[in-house]
Image (cartoon, rainbow, N blue to C red):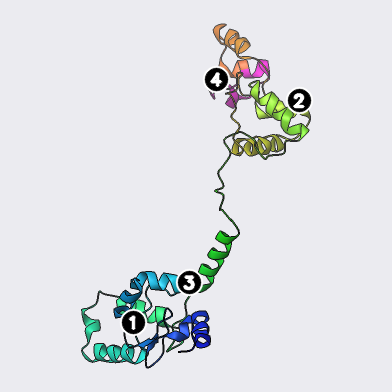
Amino acid sequence: MLAKELAYYRTHFREAVQKDGVICLECGSIFKFLPGHLCKHSLSSEEYRTKWGYNRTTPLERLSTRRKKRRNAIAMKLGSLSPRGSIEKAIKAKRGRAWPYRPESRLIQTEAARARVAAGFRRVEQRRSTVPGDGLALSKEDRQVLSLRNRGLWPSEIAVLLGIRVESVRWRLERLGKAGFTFPAPTGPRPIPHRKVTDDELLILVRSGLSIPEIAQGSGCRWRMLTGGSNV
């Protein structure tokens, strides 16, 4: 084979596997079964496929031999000896692929990988930062909410101090929590908008011997608030 023809087949290596033989891309000779010849070039079948871009499952033998083996396997019903579901998987894998040449799906990936290596490309692993709030733009209200929450205030108390809605405070706290911020537990009791008396005043009224309806009527509290436990 001429050097010009060999250079063509080295560029279009899939065409080197032909019906009547396989062209060796090392020396240009034609063989029915190429792996037996590769020992002269000190190459194994895997090394030969990797060097010239073939898939690792591409048979290095002429197409007529592959077709004959396929017909014999069908005649001998060797498919019945294969694992369950393997025939369906093979049909799905074969569907849409042109015959007799098997498209090399790894060709584009291999060339792209070689180009990245030649350009000195190195993949940088993206890791999540351990610094709270790294990459998060904090507004003035975010900083105010964060400062008041760290003092142990409830969201409703923060909303009253800043003059914003409670839902806005909770949304900001949730966003800051996802960013890695941690908050201490509230120090005071949960604020209730209908609270008329403090816990100490309520205990004094209870110890005076008054009933719950009398305490509710005298203090202006709701009955449910007096019977609901400590959160009154």
Q: Is residue 140 left or right of residue 192?
A: right
Q: Position of residue 18 (x, y in %)?
A: 41, 89
CA–CA distance in space, label 1 to label 2 = 83 Å
Q: CA distance from mark 3 to mark 1?
A: 21 Å
Say if residue 97 shows up in the picture. Answer: no
Asked if labels 3 and 2 touch by Cβ distance under 8 angstroms, the answer is no
Mark 2 or mark 4: name the one nearer the start of the chain. Answer: 2
Sequence-earlier tag: 1 or 2: 1
Q: Which residue is mark 3?
A: 106
Please state the horizontal and vertical placement of residue 44, each as a whole percent of the image. Answer: 33, 71
Residue under numbered circle 2 = 161
Rendered image: mark on residue 34: 1
**Callout 1, which amino acid?**
Leu
Looking at the image, residue 81 sits to the left or right of residue 179; the answer is: left
The residue lying at 77 percent from left, 32 percent from top is 140
Residue 6 vertical position relative to residue 231 in the rendered view, above or below: below
Mark closer to the observer (2, 3): 3
Q: Secondary structure at mark 4?
A: loop
Disc number lying in front (3 or 4)? 3
Q: Is residue 91 above or below residue 228?
A: below
The quadrant in which residue 60 appears is: bottom left
Name the residue at 48% across, 72% down. Answer: 106
Q: Quadrant of residue 202?
A: top right
